[in-house]
């Protein structure tokens, strides 16, 4: 049996801490709603991307943080990677 590698890189995974505007929501439902809005906006503007949300997924200095992950698969994204990363960060951090 032999292994045939079709592609060495399947894509790029961006992992970002959620912005302060999301963290400032008072209830868990408000936070979830804000995260959902971010995910919808990302998927609308980057239709081939896969978006993931991790609650308390990052631990630094004994503090837990929520994160959002955006997987940009190889294909057309590779040609425009910098632009797509900038677009994702613009959406996450509200820099429109």
Image (spheres, rainbow, N blue to C red):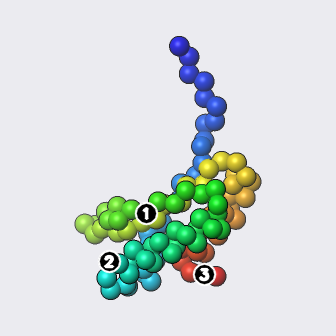
The crowd level at tag 2 (other Cα within 10 Å; few <14, some 14-19, many 20+) is: few
The disc, 3 or 1, on the residue closer to the chain's N-terminal end is 1
Tag of residue 95: 3
The x, y position of residue 72, in whole percent, is 60, 55
Q: Is mark 3 on a helix, strand or loop?
A: loop
Q: Which residue corresponds to mark 2?
A: 28
The residue carrying mark 1 is 53
Q: Quadrant of residue 89?
A: bottom right
Q: Distance between the residues labelled 3 and 1?
A: 20 Å
Q: Indicate the position of residue 75 as horizontal and vertical percent values.
A: 70, 48
**Mark 1, secondary structure of its residue:** strand
**Closer to the observer: label 3 or label 2?**
2
Name the one closer to the observer, 30 or 82: 30
Q: Residue at x 32, y 86 (%)?
A: 26
Number of on-image labels = 3
Label 3, label 2: how many angstroms apart (C-alpha)? 24 Å
Residue 27, image x and y in percent?
Answer: 31, 82
């Amino acid at each position: 049996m032999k292994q045939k590698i079709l592609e060495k890189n399947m894509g790029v995974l961006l992992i970002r801490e959620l912005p302060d505007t999301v963290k400032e929501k008072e209830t868990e439902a408000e936070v979830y709603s804000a995260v959902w809005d971010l995910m919808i906006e990302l998927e609308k503007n980057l239709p081939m991307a896969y978006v993931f949300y991790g609650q308390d997924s990052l631990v630094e200095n004994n503090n837990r943080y929520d994160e959002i992950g955006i997987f940009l698969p190889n294909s057309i994204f590779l040609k425009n990677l910098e632009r797509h990363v900038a677009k994702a960060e613009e959406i996450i951090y509200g820099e429109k």
